[in-house]
Image (spheres, rainbow, N blue to C red):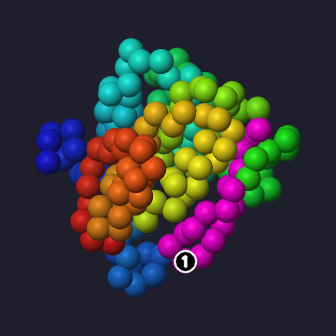
Amino acid sequence: MNTIASELAASIRSIPDYPKPGIIFRDITTMLGDARAFRRAVDALVQPYAGTKIDKVAGMEARGFILGGAVAHQLSAGFVPIRKKGKLPHDIVRIAYSLEYGVDEMEMHRDAVNPGERVILVDDLIATGGTAVGATKLLRQIGAEVVAACFVIDLPDLGGRKKLEELDVPVHTLVEFSGH
C-alpha cells in the first residue's frame, strides 16, 4: 500500500458487525473530520483528471455528495446529485438498481446533464457495485459520457469494480480493504 493509501486507511474507522453480524462497516466520517486526510483524499481523487475536460461530477447520496462536491470544485465542473427516489422536486429520470439485500430506485433531474457531457461518478465506497452500476446506467440514459467512477474505498472481494469495468467505466480507488 502506498503512503497516501496507508494514511487514508488509518483515518477510516472500521466497525465490526454493522449493519449485521459478519460485516465490517468502513466509516469515512473519521476521514472527513481529519482536515489533512480529507484534503489528501480529494486531491487523490482529482489527480488523474486534472487538466482534462470534465463537465460534471455526479455524487451518489449521501457521502458521494460530500466527496463529489469537493471533486467538482477542484475540477471546475458542475455537480449533479443522484438521489434516492422521491427527493428531487423537478422533472426527473429514474432507474431501479440492485442492492446487496434487495432493490431500490435512484433519480436525478432530467436537465442536470446534457447529452455528450463528460461526467465522473463519485462515492465513498464500491462494494457489490449495484448503486454505481445503476448510477452509470442512469447517466447514460440521458446521454452522458461516464468518463470514470471514483471511490475512496474498494472492497474487491464483493466484485463491484469488475461490474463497472464490464460496462467500460474505468474505476479509480484510493484504498482497498479485503473481506466484507
148 left or right, relative to 82? left
Residue 153 coordinates in the image, percent (x, y): 35, 52
Q: Is residue 16 above or below residue 127?
A: below
Q: Is residue 58 above or below residue 107?
A: above
Residue 170 occupies quadrant: top left
User: Magenta region: which residues?
Assistant: 95-110
Q: Nearer the viewer, residue 155 or 142?
A: 142
Q: Nearer the viewer, residue 8 or 90?
A: 90
65 left or right, relative to 47? right
Taking the spot 48% from the left edge, 76% from the top edge, the residue there is 19
Q: Amino acid at mark 1?
A: Tyr
Taking the spot 60% from the left edge, 34% from the top edge, the residue there is 144
Q: Is residue 137 above or below residue 112?
A: below
2 left or right, relative to 75? left
State which quarter of the image contains the C terminus. Answer: bottom left
Residue 116 occupies quadrant: top right
Q: Is residue 39 visible?
A: no
Is 9 contained in the magenta span? Answer: no
